[in-house]
Amino acid sequence: LMLITSIPQYIQGITNAKVDLTTTDDTVLFTVPSDADFNAAVVNSILVSEDSGNADTITVTLVSGSSTFSLFKVKAVGANTTVELLTKDLILQSGEVLKVQAATANRLHVIASIQELSKTRVTTSALSRI
């Protein structure tokens, strides 16, 4: 049980979001669910791996409604290395979108470890499966 903004939060799912950045486009890594059951997510880890033998950079942004916030702007990733971007958990709210963008295509892989949180101990979607 975790309390966020005085509302009990229950871990309802764990997942990893992953993307191979084959373009230099701004790419969605994860979107926080916005249905009745889920209302937040905690990103525990964002790993970035460079697999082409060439150093590169990554930009990570958080989109909340019509606003975009920079989390990492042109963060260096060494050749053939993996970097952990987070030193603390990142809390995302319902509907927010985590995006990543490589400076060069076909060099970076990104994997995020995520806990999805709900307001109830048993979700309505879980009840519908009974």
Image (spheres, grey):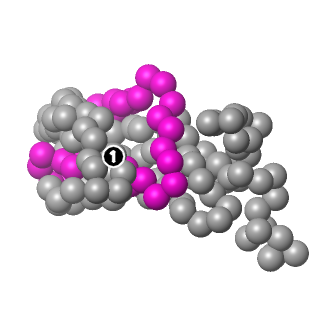
Q: Position of residue 38 (x, y in %)?
A: 63, 57
Residue at 81 percent across and 52 percent down: it is 121
Residue 14 makes an appearance in the image: no
Q: Is residue 117 above or below residue 129?
A: above
Residue at 76 percent across and 62 percent down: it is 123
For badge 1, the amino acid type reads: Leu
Q: Position of residue 53 (x, y in %)?
A: 17, 39
* 122 in the magenta segment: no
Tell me where the magenta segment starts and ends, as one range: 80-108
Tell me if 40 is positioned left or right of 51 in this view. right
Tell me if 94 is positioned left or right of 99 in this view. right
Q: For the N terminus, give its image quadrant.
A: top right
Tell me if 101 is positioned left or right of 123 in this view. left
Q: For the C terminus, give its image quadrant.
A: bottom right
Q: Residue furthest right?
A: 130
Q: Position of residue 95 (x, y in %)?
A: 46, 58
Tell me if 93 is positioned left or right of 28 in this view. right
* 94 in the magenta segment: yes
Residue at 17 percent across and 59 percent down: it is 25
Per the image, the residue denoted by label 1 is 62
Give the class, few, some or many, for how many residues have Cα within 10 Å of label 1's Cα (few <14, many ≥20). many
Q: Position of residue 125 (x, y in %)?
A: 73, 70
| Number of marks present in the image shown | 1
